[in-house]
Image (spheres, rainbow, N blue to C red):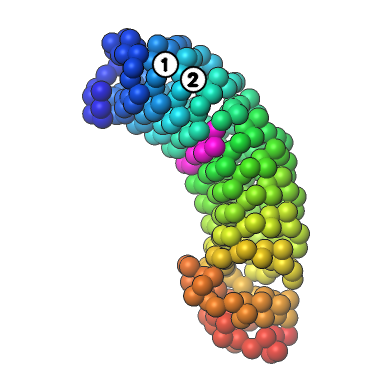
Amino acid sequence: MGPGNSLKSAILDEIKDLKNLKHLDLSSNHIDTLEDGIFGKLEALTSLNLATNVIKKIGRKTFAGLENLVDLGLQENVIDRIDAKSFADLASLTSLSLRANFLSSFDSDTFKSKSIKWLSLVFNNVQELTNGTFEKTPNLQELDLSTNSHFVNLDEQAFRGLANLQRLNLSNTNLTNFRVSTLKSTPNLTEFDLSNTGVFSLEKSTFASTKNLQVLRLADTRLVGLPEGIFDKLTHLDVLDLYGNDWVCDKRLKWLVIWLKAKPAESIFTNGVPVCKAPEKLQDKSLYEIDSDKLH
């Protein structure tokens, strides 16, 4: 069964006895309801694509029996509810896409799983992440929460327990505050994206616990300056995106100008070289052009 079949979920009964089936694509089939255990006899199934349907709810037993399932695609549905521990028994599940749904809140039991490594929550209605939201998903390596326009509150302990997390994307959200200890529990983070947010300040020790960062994106935020030494621990940094911010090039930014000039622009900036917004005499000049000794 492939894309484009206008099936109702009741027709899934015709599929459930295909015990040796490994890959099942039911995308774009207008499926609106998934009965508990509907896939239970498909014990060999490793990938299940349910994208672009009109599924609204995921129940505790919806995927019961799929112990070999590795990849689950639920993107582009209308899901606004996921029962606690709905994925907990999927022992092999490593990739879960819930992109473009209507999820607004969840807790640590929502994504409880010892196997999930990749989780996409892009373009949902997420408003906040509370203390320990993902602590029962300890092997998560990549988490994408970008393009959640209502996302405004991030508890500083939201990522507690994610010691294996390598890539975190919070871009294109309405976050304004990013507390200093938010990344304390993610020591193996290599890529972090906070671009296109309302964040207006960062503290010196924000990245003190993420010494393995290789890619850091802080473009198009409300940052006008950065505290001296904020990048001191980032000895592996290869890409730094500071473009599109209204940098105030005065004595408080002198350290950054000096720090940047020690690094080739073409090797560290992939989105463009950052420029000054103020004072007027330095407006639109890149941080590589200005003389640090003349910053007052």
| Residue 109 within the segment the image draws in magenta | no
Instruction: Please tell me whether residue 251 is drawn above or below residue 59 in the rendered image.
Output: below
Question: Percent x, y for residue 11?
Answer: 29, 12
User: Residue at horizontal 61%, vertical 81%?
Assistant: 261
Mark 2 closeness class: few <14, some 14–19, many ≥20 residues within 10 Å: some
**Position above or below: 286 against 75:** below
Which quarter shows the N terminus?
A: top left
User: Which residue is drawn at the image coordinates 45% and 25% (left, top)?
Assistant: 69
Q: Which residue is mark 1?
A: 43
Q: Which residue is mark 2?
A: 67
Q: Are marks 1 and 2 in contact (CB under 8 Å)?
A: yes
Q: Is residue 262 left or right of residue 21?
A: right
Q: Which residues are magenta?
A: 116-125
The amino acid type found where label 2 is placed reads: Glu
Residue 190 point in image, percent of width and height? 59, 54
Q: Is any part of residue 213 visible from this angle? A: yes
Q: CA distance from mark 1 to mark 2?
A: 7 Å
| Near-viewer residue (170 or 61) | 61
Is 124 included in the stretch rendered in magenta? Answer: yes
In the image, residue 131 sits, relative to residue 7, either above or below, namely below
- At label 1, the amino acid type is Glu
Q: Pinpoint residue 76: horizontal percent, then vertical percent.
A: 39, 34
Q: Specify the quadrant of the image occupied by residue 282.
A: bottom right
Tell me the quarter of the image containing the C terminus.
Answer: bottom right
Q: Residue sitting at 34 percent across and 26 percent down? A: 23
Q: Secondary structure at mark 2?
A: loop
